[in-house]
Amino acid sequence: MNKLSGTKKKIYEAALKLFAQKGYKATTVREIARAVGIQQSAIYNHFKNKEAILDEIIDNLSNSHLINLFEDKDPKDIYKKGKSILKHISNMFKLISYDTKTDLLFRFMMQELFNNERLRIFYNEEFYQKNVKKLSIVFFMMMQEEMIASMDPLVLANEFFSPLFFYQLQIVRLKADNKSTAVAATLFEKHTDFFWDRIRINNERKEQLFN
Amino acid sequence: MNKLSGTKKKIYEAALKLFAQKGYKATTVREIARAVGIQQSAIYNHFKNKEAILDEIIDNLSNSHLINLFEDKDPKDIYKKGKSILKHISNMFKLISYDTKTDLLFRFMMQELFNNERLRIFYNEEFYQKNVKKLSIVFFMMMQEEMIASMDPLVLANEFFSPLFFYQLQIVRLKADNKSTAVAATLFEKHTDFFWDRIRINNERKEQLFN
DNA sequence: GTCTATACAGAGATAGAC
DNA sequence: GTCTATCTCTGTATAGAC
């Protein structure tokens, strides 16, 4: 996507912004053109039609930070860091909520989720399943090393993931109304603290386990 | 809303269904009329215009089960039930996800959240704030009675609420593709178990507290 | 209150000159 | 590759007969 010609990239970015703000259907080709600074018909030199712009945006979601919470790190390498890796992931969610570009992608995704089956497939496989599975591997390894209490890793992964998603939605929603996000933003860290304290095996409990 | 004349109610319900499925903008007045079985122009005998239908739907959200998780019970009366009240709320979320009518309202709400400021106000005040505040009162009372560990009740309320919301979204999304919701449905209960076990003060810990 | 007919505006897309 | 002009279709809304 970064290798597109100047105008095509401008169209892509203007469209993404408008789709995220008003939705795909409510956005007109004329509006996109106006945002880019060209005539409406010139759009068709770069995209076959309006839907082709939408498709290109969906195609490119996979490259975004929205889904790469682990930044290609292998869960098996990072679980040893314990709480700090959870802090890191939690912080990724927070950064994404404030990053102007990724914020648009998230808003676009939520906006069109029920209108586009390809998008739902992306959401399910790349955004949800992939991340939750990686998380559950991390938790599974932590259990084996007796860093955390033993329970269903997949449930644990869902429990860790879901509040982060919710708080992200909160931030993006509040930003849509130019409201303060300060309180919501603190919840990312508080979630990790709360969660880790719940599952960790501290010294006392560890002694109990081995006695 | 239940006191509307026959046709007006039919229009309302057909519109809600279509708005929830395809979004407000993508739904045409003709489609609504076709679903009701009347001519497109006849709609205007019952609603001033298309937007008036949308407004009426938003007005009526407050009457739905979507927001009345507590069914008008006073938090101060129910906290004593401990875990079972959490189970009850968790189950309400699950039921809502499967109830055909409330499911539509939820999907409609998520669909139009970023397109309608009034809807965002409703979401924030009625769906989120109101329920989370009631929850935090419940948790606060539980803390005072030393049923659960002492911490910020509002954080706790958010931590309990957010996975329920997320799992509800999962169910509604999966249903949109006619996929199985069995696994996702189990997460409601597992969440409550996980959560309660985290915060409750069991006998051992209680003894530690008092010694 | 519903119908047919129609007005009117807005949207997506194409043709052809430059 | 961009422009102007235009086509065609679709959508909202109104008028007026029944």
Image: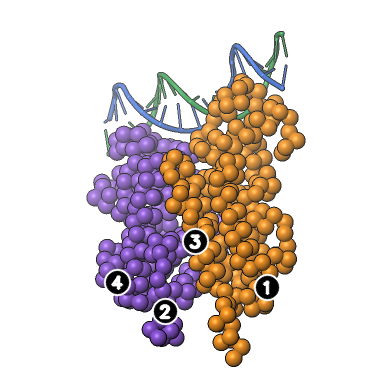
Chain colours: A purple, B orange, C blue, D green
Q: What residue is disc 1 on?
A: B141
Q: Is residue D7 toward the left or the right of residue B111 in the image?
A: left
| Three-letter code, disc 2 | Ile
Task: Using the rendered view, name the quadrant where residue A83 is placed.
Answer: bottom left
The verdict on a common chain for dots 3 and 1 is yes
Of the two numbered discs 4 and 2 in the rendering, the one whose residue sits closer to the viewer: 2
Element class at badge 4: helix
Residue B181 image offset from top left, x and y in percent: 46, 47
| Residue name at image x 31 percent, y 49 percent | A60
Q: Residue at x 30, y 54 (%)?
A: A63
Q: Are marks 2 and 3 on the same chain?
A: no
Which residue, given by chain and number where applicable, does mark 3 sit on?
A: B190
Asked if marks 3 and 4 touch (Cβ < 8 Å), the reply is no
Alpha carbon distance from label 4 to label 1:
40 Å
Mark 3 vs mark 4, CA separation in Å: 26 Å
Mark 2, other Cα within 10 Å: few <14 / some 14–19 / many ≥20: some
Mark closer to the observer (3, 1): 3
Q: CA distance from mark 2 to mark 1?
A: 28 Å
CA separation in Å, label 4 and label 2: 18 Å
Residue occupied by mark 2: A201
Q: Give the amino acid type for the residue marked by disc 4 in the picture.
A: Ile
Query: Do marks 4 and 1 share a subunit?
Result: no
Residue matched to label 4: A78
Mark 1 nearby-residue class (10 Å; few <14, some 14–19, many ≥20): many
Mark 4 and 2 residues: CB-CB less than 8 Å, in contact?
A: no
User: In the visual, does A75 lie left or right of B198?
Assistant: left
Tell me the residue at 64%/30% (across/down). Answer: B11
